Amino acid sequence: MTEKELKYIVPQEQIQAFLSSADYKSEITQSYFDDRQVTALVKQFQINLPEQIEKVSARLRREQVGSETNYILTVKGSLPEQASSDRCEDELELEEKDYEQLLKEAQAGTIKKTRYCFTIDIAAYPVQLTVDLFHCLAGKQQEWEYAMLEVEYTDDEVKEILRSEKHGLAILENAREVTEDPGFTNRQLARELPTEKP
């Protein structure tokens, strides 16, 4: 599966009012594996990825929505000819016991966040917008003053509209796009905060 998304950061205080209109929210814990572990995970769980994939990473997620809890192992990577906003991924649902075992092995940091989910339209195209507020990152229990916004889409015209700033989304007015900045991946935030203010 190919994931297409643009990623932004914005000061939390500027989007608090927007959060009340979310379709739903979830509590997420994500733990990461170092590069040496990813190859073994792909083989162990028979993860389906293209042969030419590069920059592969693996993430372990626990997500709670109301009384329902899901456990997911996700492996992501990019193809040489892909745009930076597109990534290949394969996901595998886990039993709780398998999650707990893998959690002991994850060595590349953990984040905890509350995710707010929205379905919106951009120029008549339906897109998924998520807003993440972080509570644990860079190895510490701490609140981050920024929120991370991700817009997931299927039609590339949406990306052009977003980058042309003709999207009409008030929540993005003061946001900064960080799609191509490796310092703002969730995996990197699990290890350390960016050294420069956004």
Image (cartoon, rainbow, N blue to C red):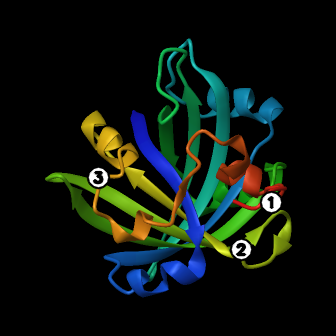
Closer to the chain start, of discs 3 and 2, is 2
Is 170 in front, or is 79?
Answer: 170
* x 82%, y 30%: residue: 36
* x 43%, y 63%: residue: 172
Closer to the chain start, of discs 3 and 1, is 3
Cβ–Cβ below 8 Å for labels 2 and 1?
yes
Element assignment for label 2 = loop
Is 194 in front, or is 137?
Answer: 194
**Residue on which disc 2 sits:** 144
Distance from label 3 to label 1 (Cα)? 31 Å
- Residue 75 place in picture, x, y as percent: 58, 37
Element assignment for label 3 = loop
Q: Which quarter shows the C terminus?
A: bottom right
Closer to the chain start, of discs 2 and 1, is 2
Please state which of the two labelled residues, at mark 3 or mark 1, is closer to the viewer.
3
Is 95 in front, or is 53?
Answer: 53
The picture quadrant where one finds residue 167 is bottom left
- Residue 104 place in picture, x, y as percent: 81, 56
* x 28%, y 43%: residue: 158
Q: Residue furthest top?
A: 52
Identify the disc placed on residue 193: 1
* x 35%, y 41%: residue: 159
The picture quadrant where one finds residue 13 is bottom right
What is the three-letter code of the residue carrying label 2?
A: Trp
What is the three-letter code of the residue carrying label 1?
A: Leu
**Residue on which disc 3 sits:** 166
Q: Which quarter shows the N terminus?
A: top left
Task: Give above or below for 119 relative to 6.
Answer: below
* Left or right of residue 69: residue 198: right
* Left or right of residue 37: residue 125: left
